[in-house]
Amino acid sequence: MKKIVILISGRGSNMECLIQACREQGWDAQIAAVIANRPDAAGLEIAQSHQIPVQVVTSKGFETREAFEAELSKVIDCYAPDLVVLAGFMRILTAPFVEHYLGRMVNIHPSLLPSFPGLATHQKALTEGVKVHGATVHYVTPELDHGPIIMQGVVPVLPQDNEQSLAERVLAMEHRIYPAALQAILQGQVWFETNKAGHAPAFKACLGLESS
Ligand code: GRF
């Protein structure tokens, strides 16, 4: 059985979807732990309510980013995870940390990458006037929000949208694609290659619009 460690900073709604999908869909995997970099991350209580072990590793008390990451790695590696899943983990990670987990660390980003890396993606989408927006699950590489794309989910941008309505539509799509992408990785339908993600021919790498 594969082991998954999830890293969060806040609300944890993607994390909860993954915990539920893992159990309800009978994945050949176990969520071994949820680790937060903030003691007040709301997702910690949710994880505990699902009987998932939780850990907090804050950057406080560490003089450098590297020292914090060394501690974080130590905690993660205690669980010997096959997959490290970033689910709203709001830290910029150094190249050595990312390289340690290369090919087994994934992230979800609330835009159709390579459009709108970084923060405030929904605001950027509205400002640019794009007609479709969405979310991307990707392998994590040292360049922020640029790793090989595993799966994307597309939603429409409607004329009456504001940041909140668009964020809600994208989040609902995140909750569909993150479990689907992880399950595909666990089943060997998707794999890491240096500059791209390998996909089995039958794998559906894009979801969306049909629900609009
Ligand atoms: C999500 O929008 C995710 O795409 C981004 O951070 C947010 C986390 O939300 N990386 P939640 O904590 O999973 O509810």
Image (tube, grey):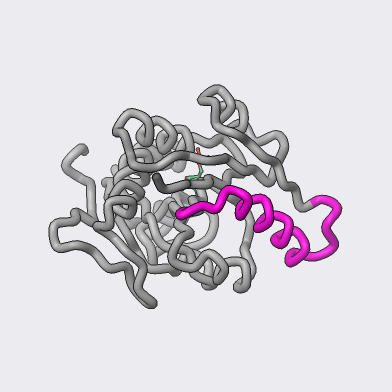
Q: Is residue 41 left or right of residue 194?
A: right
Quarter of the rendering containing residue 180: top left
Q: Position of 69 compared to 53: left or right?
A: right
**Image coords of residue 127 (percent x, y):** 43, 56
In front here: 64 or 207? 64
Q: Nearer the viewer, residue 115 or 66?
A: 66
Extreme residue toward the top, this view:
49
**Rendered residue at 39%/67% (across/down):** 114
Magenta run includes residue 72: yes
**Above or below, 86 relative to 143:** above
> How many marks overall?
0
Point out residue 202 in the picture as x, y percentages from the top left corner: 13, 57
Magenta extent: 60-83
Front residue of this view, candidates 137 and 97: 97
**In this view of the protein, can residue 208 be seen by the observer?**
yes
Picture coordinates of residue 189 (x, y %)?
24, 57
Quarter where residue 188 is shown: bottom left
Judged left or right of residue 150, residue 33 is right
| Residue at point 37%, 55% (across, down) | 136
Residue placed farthest to the left in the image? 202
For the C terminus, the quadrant is top left
Name the image quarter holding the N terminus. Answer: top left
The one nearer the camera, 160 or 144, is: 144
Residue at 32 percent of width and 60 percent of height: 150
| Residue 40 x/y as whole percent | 70, 34
| Residue 10, magenta (yes or no) | no
Q: Residue furthest bottom?
A: 194
Determine the residue positioned at 37% across, 39% down: 175
Say above or below: 46 vs 151.
Answer: above
Give the image quarter of residue 20.
top left
